[in-house]
Amino acid sequence: MQNIALITNTLQGGGAERCAADLSLIFSEKGFEVFVFTDTAINAEYEYAGTLVTYDLVLSVTKSTQDRNSLQEKVNELKALKAKYNIDIAISFMQVANYLNILSKDKEKVILTTHSVNSEYAKYDKSIFWAEETFRDLYQFADCITFPSEFCRNDWLEHYGDKHNITRTIYNPVHMMHVKKNEKKENVIIAIGRMHGIKRQWHLIRAFEHVKKLCPDSRMVILGDGELRPKLEDMIALRHLENDIEMPGNVKEVAYYLEKAKVFAMTSRCEAMPCSVLEALSAGVPVVSCDSPGGIREELGISDVQKNISDPLIGECGIITPYIRESGMNDISREEEILAEEIVRLLKDDCLRDRMRKAAYEKIQKFSADVIGAVWIDEIFNGTLREEINQEDFKKIRNKHLNGYQEPEIANLKMYVSYYRLLEKWMALHEKGGSVRQYFMQHKWNNIIIYGLGKMAVHLLSDIKESNINVVCAIDRGAINIYSYFPVITLEEDVPRADCIIITPVHEAESIRQSLKDRISIPMISLSDILDECVK
């Protein structure tokens, strides 16, 4: 009997965490001894099987940074736990867990599971957990790397390679939504997702306003919650859609709402393999989604040949519309109009919707827990893992990572010094009863773009709260991860119109100006310069 460790930060929250919980049930049922290494101080919301073992994935920051290496300590802790519980196979979920899992590798088999479009996230997250050398060199010593979609695996192969044929696509098991067949559905659209920036529900609301013009008796339900809710509520009120859009928050009975819906809609920026889409398909609800990096096309049975589409693509059980770019404006874009028109197409075309419903029931079977469990057993436990690794090469790469790690305070010393000086100016301004709002009022700038969404941006947003200053959007290298109440774009996208750009990473202000000067004509002001003028 083999002992399996599942290494995950929590058993609540997102798709990766739920996958860990589901696999604990699958492996336990197959007769394996399962240990879940996780932060036991956080309640487990997902059903799981096996023994919980306390292991917090957060790297501690110590005062004695010159004498201690928190990464080495955390790796040693994990290695000791693996030895204590006689772990034969260690499976980790998401990049921090993967990084610690591979660095603590001894004689056990190490399986790394990724749940993202890795190259997209790596563009913006510059930590060692997402570094190209981590993926291209260190991860190649794993026994297997799994991906939730073929899109994600191909993305990895293109950017990081597979030196030893260790990559596999294994879909996440779906939680089937068992609903009663409803022949008399009203024109209800449903969306499910956290109310955070990556889900971009503002596009749904703008598109729905157009849906109402084409199909006046339509209604929309948005399930989920998050810090984006106040912004969405303001958008709904501005369009007088309070009686047409329902937002009940986080609900347990998702099947109750899916049973009533004709169409599922999604406008996410990036989705490796959206579980909510699979749940909708299991309930026989066809999908309309904007195109985006990830596995959405695989779920809907749409070819991946055509890139950067300008017209809709109709698949087996859903429709893909062009990717929606951020404009920062309240006016509906052409991409949002197309999304709305395809939603209306499915609301009105009973034959098309019924055809997609039947196809969805058939397609969803390959995502069932039984099927996915069998794939794991065949791919992972029936002798297909690599037989051995070059221990000498592995030791060199591992030591490079362990010895090269810097504590956050040391690595970001310049940033912290500049931010300390900035906060000193801010305190002086507040002591005088002032605010940075006076700067924007003096220059008659009402529409701003914020560059960088770190801690200083939080202070800026707090200082201009309840003013008439409109944040058109933010530009952030972590745009994939940032959850905000306004659009967040990357420098690869078109920068919308605004009065100015405020640079919040003040220690990099000049280099940022130089990198943008040839493509942006509006003023770019460092937050430090704004405070200097305000405290004069």
Image (spheres, rainbow, N blue to C red):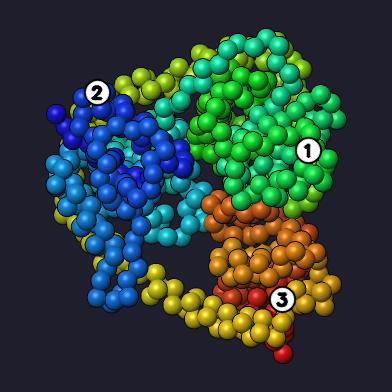
Cα gap from disc 2 to disc 3, whole angstroms: 61 Å
Q: Amino acid at mark 2?
A: Lys
Q: Earlier in the sequence, mark 1 or mark 2?
A: 2
Q: Residue at x 52, y 31 (%)?
A: 252
Q: Residue at x 59, y 47 (%)?
A: 226
Q: Residue at x 64, y 65 (%)?
A: 451
Q: Earlier in the sequence, mark 2 or mark 3?
A: 2
Q: Residues within 10 Å of mark 1 (few under 14, many from 20)?
A: some
**Residue 79's spot in the image, x, y percent?**
19, 52
Q: Which image quarter holds the N terminus? A: top left
Q: Residues within 10 Å of mark 3 (few under 14, many from 20)?
A: some
Q: Determine the image quadrant of residue 495.
A: bottom right
User: Would you name the residue on which mark 2 appears?
Assistant: 30
Image height check: is 50 above or below 481?
above
User: Would you name the residue on which mark 1 appears?
Assistant: 242
Mark 1, secondary structure of its residue: loop
Cα gap from disc 1 to disc 2, whole angstroms: 49 Å
**Residue 28's spot in the image, x, y percent?**
25, 27
Q: Residue at x 68, y 70 (%)?
A: 463
User: Would you name the residue on which mark 3 appears?
Assistant: 436
